[in-house]
């Protein structure tokens, strides 16, 4: 019986591979392939092919589990690769190059005339990067023998997923275990309809067809500051409206203040403690009615484009979770135990769909740990040590606790700070805005948190992640030989400075 299924599947795969001709032949080949895949029971069925889902699928296959991954979008990589991390970093890099050429090259003796932005070319480079990477994951699926079903999955029981195939038709995929990795979607705000034309989410902001004159960004979080930076660098007048008294409320207070000053220096405007109470799109642009967060006099702010970046919400629409009784919290997040299992035996959930930071690397760690548990091994994710990076210029990266958190916990602590102005590499390349801040336990010297604002903070932070993971003291890091000249030396100096022993300040 098993051999017959295998033969049917191999035949269907061969047809699918041969079916290069578009149209009916290719379609029926894919349907045959999907049906053959569905006929066999997998050990693991993953719904969602984002960083959580595709990594879980590959890891499960590597652990010898027969694995199927269902993805509705038609391409793998999820929000992160298709409309998130990757395209935003492509545009952040391209816009940074333009901005540098415009504002900094001359100081370095590089003169350019007739500098201009070719937006279609910039978008094409971003799209090429995305396309290459999504194809790459398909290749990894083939290499690891993960069955890929393109379609929208709905759980009809704890071991069956009904899939509406992208190319039409339906199939049922059976699995001993099901992992929900359906990610998140943009959170809309009351009274504001995202049309992806004048009022856009991050997805629309990643593919505007022209450079707007004025943009209002609602929410000074990761997306607002990154996408706001992209358009600000390309010449848009960007105003960020934030409900809270501070930008990126989760950031260390001291770093956050310096970060905001830096963004203001780059001409971004901020309206903090402010809420949007009305939106009028009837004219050419958009008129926003604003009000102080605590209530008070209203004002009007005009924009060509409004970016709504006030958070994201788990995506579980149409998944059939109510019918099989999967528990969720008030925010719509799927509740799981330490082994990522929901209250329904055999049904697991990971990534943005469950509580925790909505970050791609956290989703990946969830995925690996979840399938390790499934395979009878031990999985592990240390949620206290998930690094966070805002990829602006300079970047802001952190791991562990902020000074405010340490203070609130009542632990006696020391702070070591080192400004990039005193770092020789940063000075040599004329990119010396920022600092490194280390918070360490006063008694034991164990590092509790590291916060870095520097052009390559997102890379440097991993030394700090390792240090915290292995329970290093600030003296441990201070005694490690760091290559010179590097910006990483600023971390060593900040560690020395927790004992007021920095050499270069
Ligand atoms: C603009 C932007 C920039 C970002 N930048 C970063 C960054 O630099 N670094 C970082 O760490 N994080 C970043 N993030 C966050 C990151 O994208 C998410 O945390 C990450 O993608 C979550 O992974 P996931 O696998 O849980 O979900 P997702 O990536 O959302 O993947 C879920 C997938 O499931 C599919 N799906 C949903 N329902 C079904 C269904 N019923 N059937 C089949 N398929 C389904 C979806 O189509 C989607 O492809 C960014 C997000 C955005 C929006
Ligand atoms: N570099 C990265 O790692 C990266 C980049 C982009 C997105 N992401 C992830 O994507 C998720 C979503 O990003 P995001 O920026 O939309 O959310 P966010 O949670 O980072 O920030 C949302 C901001 O909007 C504010 N806000 C909420 N309601 C508001 C309102 N009505 N009016 C004004 N301000 C309001 C919040 O106070 C907060 O500052 C984040 O959780 C983040 O983890 C990560």
Image (cartoon, rainbow, N blue to C red):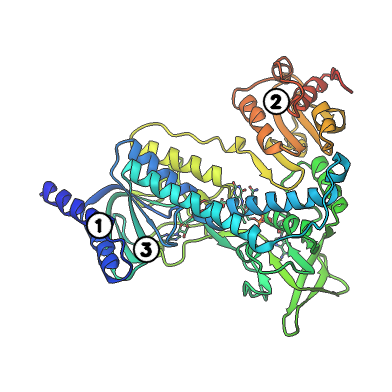
Question: Is residue 200 shown left or right of residue 20?
Answer: right
Sequence-earlier tag: 3 or 2: 3
Displayed quadrant of residue 163: bottom left
Question: Is residue 197 shown left or right of residue 139?
Answer: right
Secondary structure found at label 1 = helix
Q: Observer-nearest residue: 266 or 184?
A: 266
- Name the residue beneath numbered marker 3: 151
Sequence-earlier tag: 1 or 2: 1
Mark 3 crowdedness (10 Å alpha carbons): few <14, some 14-19, many ≥20: many
User: In which quadrant will I find the C terminus?
Assistant: top right
Question: Is residue 151 shown left or right of residue 457?
Answer: left
Secondary structure found at label 2 = strand
Q: Which disc number belongs to residue 387? A: none
| Residue 145 visible, this angle | yes
Residue 354 placed where, x, y %? 51, 51
Mark 2 crowdedness (10 Å alpha carbons): few <14, some 14-19, many ≥20: many
How far apart in space, not on screen, are marks 3 and 2 (Cα)? Answer: 46 Å
- Name the residue beneath numbered marker 2: 447
Mark 3 and mark 2 in contact? Answer it, CB < 8 Å.
no
Residue 401 placed where, x, y %? 70, 36
- Name the residue beneath numbered marker 1: 38
The residue carrying mark 3 has its beta carbon less than 8 Å from ligand 1: yes
| Residue 80 visible, this angle | no
Residue 494 placed where, x, y %? 79, 25
The residue carrying mark 2 has its beta carbon less than 8 Å from ligand 2: no
How far apart in space, not on screen, are marks 1 and 3 (Cα)? Answer: 12 Å
* Number of numbered labels in the structure image: 3
Sequence-earlier tag: 1 or 3: 1
Observer-side mark, 1 or 2, equals 1
Displayed quadrant of residue 194: bottom right
Ligand 2 position by quadrant: bottom right
How far apart in space, not on screen, are marks 1 and 2 (Cα)? Answer: 50 Å
């Amino acid at each position: 019986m098993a051999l017959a299924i295998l033969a049917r599947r191999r035949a269907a795969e061969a047809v699918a591979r041969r079916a290069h001709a578009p149209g009916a032949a290719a379609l029926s080949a894919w349907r045959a392939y999907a049906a053959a895949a569905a006929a066999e029971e997998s050990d693991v069925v993953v719904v969602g092919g984002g960083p959580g889902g595709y990594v879980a699928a590959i890891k499960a296959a590597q652990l010898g589990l027969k694995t199927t991954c269902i993805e509705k979008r038609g391409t793998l990589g999820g929000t992160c690769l298709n409309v998130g991390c990757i395209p935003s970093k492509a545009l952040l890099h391209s816009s940074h190059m333009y901005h540098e050429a415009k504002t900094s090259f001359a100081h370095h003796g590089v003169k350019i005339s007739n500098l201009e932005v070719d937006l279609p070319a910039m978008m094409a480079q971003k799209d090429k990067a995305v396309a290459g990477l999504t194809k790459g994951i398909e290749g990894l699926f083939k290499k690891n023998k993960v069955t890929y079903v393109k379609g929208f999955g709905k759980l009809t029981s704890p071991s069956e997923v009904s899939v509406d195939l992208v190319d039409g038709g339906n199939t049922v995929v059976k699995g001993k275990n099901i992992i929900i990795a359906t990610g998140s979607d943009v959170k809309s705000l009351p009274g504001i309809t995202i049309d992806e034309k004048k009022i856009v989410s991050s997805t629309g902001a990643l593919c505007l067809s022209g450079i707007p004159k004025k943009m209002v960004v609602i929410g000074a979080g990761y997306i607002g500051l990154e996408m706001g930076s992209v358009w600000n660098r390309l010449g848009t007048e960007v105003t960020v409206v934030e409900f809270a008294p501070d930008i990126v409320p989760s950031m260390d207070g001291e770093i956050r203040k310096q970060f905001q000053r830096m963004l203001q220096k780059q001409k971004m405007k901020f309206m903090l403690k402010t809420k949007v109470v009305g939106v009028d799109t009837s004219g050419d642009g958009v008129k926003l009615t604003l009000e102080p967060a605590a209530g008070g006099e209203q004002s009007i702010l005009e924009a060509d484009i409004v970016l709504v970046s006030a958070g994201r919400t788990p995506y579980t629409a149409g998944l059939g979770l109510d019918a099989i009784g999967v528990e969720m919290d008030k925010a719509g997040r799927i509740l799981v135990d330490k082994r990522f299992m929901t209250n329904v035996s055999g049904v697991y959930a990971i990534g943005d769909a469950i509580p925790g930071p909505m970050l791609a690397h956290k989703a990946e760690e969830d995925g690996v740990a979840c399938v390790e548990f499934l395979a009878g091994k031990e999985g592990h994710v240390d949620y206290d040590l998930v690094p966070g990076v805002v990829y602006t210029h300079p970047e802001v990266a952190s791991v562990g606790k902020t000074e405010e958190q340490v203070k609130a916990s009542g632990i006696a602590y020391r702070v070591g700070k080192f400004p990039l102005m005193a770092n020789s590499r940063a000075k040599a390349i004329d990119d010396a805005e920022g600092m490194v801040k280390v918070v360490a336990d006063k008694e034991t010297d164990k590092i509790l948190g590291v916060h870095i604002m520097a052009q390559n903070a997102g890379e440097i932070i991993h030394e700090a992640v390792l240090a915290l993971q292995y329970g290093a003291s600030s003296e441990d890091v201070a005694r490690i030989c760091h290559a010179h000249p590097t910006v990483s030396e600023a971390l060593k100096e900040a560690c020395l400075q927790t004992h007021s022993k920095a050499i270069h300040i």
